[in-house]
Amino acid sequence: MVKSIKTVMAKTPQNENNLRAFFFSFLKFLREDFSIKKHLPVYFFTGIMVFVLYYFGFEKWKRSLDLSASANFIFLTSAYIISFVPVLFWVMYSEKKRIAVRGVLIALLFISLYAVCSSWSPYHSFTFFSESIHHYWYRKFLSNAVPFVIFFFAFIIFWKSFFKGTGRFMWTGSEMGGLKIIYPLLIVVVVIVFIGSRIGDFGNDYPVFEIKKASGNSIVPYLQLYSFEAAYALDFYVVEILFRGVLVLGLLKYFGNNVLLPMASLYVFIHYGKPMAETISSFFGAYLLGYLAIYTRSVLPGTVLHVTLAWTMEVVGALVLVSK
C-alpha cells in the first residue's frame, strides 16, 4: 500500500470547515501533487479522448450500432477501463509506486457494476413501458432510478468486505460541518449556470426532462416532472458514491493521492454527449470534488454541489426553452 488512509487524511484540517481553509488547503495539496511528468501526460491523454469523442461523433456512432444490453455492457466496460486504468498505472509509475492489485480489482468491480447500470433499463426490456402513453416519463425516470437501485444496494452488500476501516458507513459521516464549505460555492454554481446558458448549445441539452412532452392531464405532468427530478438527484448520488466514494476514499489506502487523476479521467468519459465545454470542465471539477471528499471525509458535500448544479441547469434550461 502507498500510504495508510489515516496518513493521507491526517493532512487535511478536519476541524476547519470553511471555504477559505479549504481553498488554501487545496492549493497546498495541488502544489505537492503536481509535477509535469505526472500531470501533463494525463492532460494530453484526456484531451485526445475528448477530441476523438467529439470529432468523430462517438455518441451518434454508438447509437447507430443499436447494441443489445449485454453488448452495450461490454462496450461501456471496455471504454471505462481504457479511460481509467492507463492513467492509474501512469501516475503510479511516475511516482515509482507499486500497483496494489486488490485496489485495481476493487476499482474494476465497481466500474463494471456502473457499466451494468448504464447499459440496461426496464424501459428497453419490457414493451409495457415503451407502449404506454407515459412512455416519455418511463424512459426518463427509469434511466435514473434503476442505476440507483442496482448500484446502491450492491454497494451496501460489498461495503463491509471492501471498505470497512476507510471511514464512516458510505462516507456520509456524522457531522454536517463539511457542508459549510460549499455554501458560498452554491451561489457560484448558480451564477456560472446562468452565464453558461447564454453561450454554446446549452438549450439543446437542458432541461433533461421537458414537461411539454409529459402525458396526462391536470397535475399528472408535474408529478412526472418532480418524480423524475428526485430520481435525477439520486442518480447523482450514485455518481458521487462511485467516483468520490469508491474511486477516491475507498482506494486511498491502496494508491494514496494518486487516485484523483484516474478518477477524473474516467469522469470525463461519462460526460460524452454533453456540451464539450461541460465535458472538458468535468475533469477539473472531478479533481476538485475528489479533494473535497478527502478533505471532508465525505461524499455529501460533493453530492449537494452536484445536485444543485443539475437542478439549476434544469431550471435555467426550462426558462431558455420557454423564452424561445
Image (spheres, grey):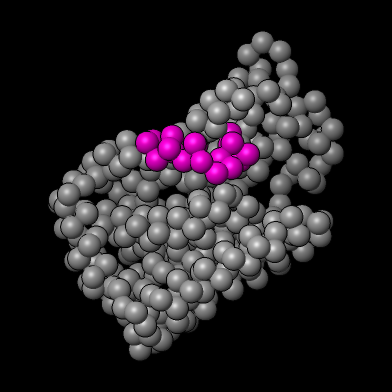
Q: Tell which residue pokes out farthest to the top in this image.
A: 218
Residue 34's place in the image compared with 137, above or below, is below
Relative image position of residue 303 (x, y in whole percent): 41, 45
Q: Residue at x 63, y 60 (%)?
A: 54
Tell me, yes or no, if residue 310 can be seen here.
no
Q: Residue at x 33, y 40 (%)?
A: 188
Q: 246 or 157, which is in the foreground?
A: 246
**How many numbered badges does the structure rendering display?**
0
Tell me, yes or no, if residue 22 can be seen here.
yes
Residue 100 location, quadrant: bottom left
Q: Residue at x 49, y 36 (%)?
A: 198
Residue 212 location, quadrant: top right
- In the image, 85: left or right of 195? right
Relative image position of residue 67 (x, y in whole percent): 80, 59
Q: Which residues are magenta?
A: 190-207
Residue 36 location, quadrant: bottom left
Q: Quadrant of the N terminus?
A: bottom left
Asked whether 196 falls inside the magenta stretch, the response is yes
Q: Quadrant of the C terminus?
A: top right
Predominant SS of the magenta segment? helix
Q: 11 or 45, which is in the foreground?
A: 45
Asked whether 100 falls inside the magenta stretch, the response is no
Q: 3 or 182, which is in the foreground?
A: 182
Relative image position of residue 288 (x, y in whole percent): 34, 57
- In the image, 303: left or right of 217? left
Residue 230's place in the image compared with 14, above or below, is above
Q: 299 or 319, which is in the foreground?
A: 319
- In the image, 215: left or right of 128? left
Q: Residue at x 51, y 52 (%)?
A: 277
Residue 93's place in the image compared with 125, above or below, is below
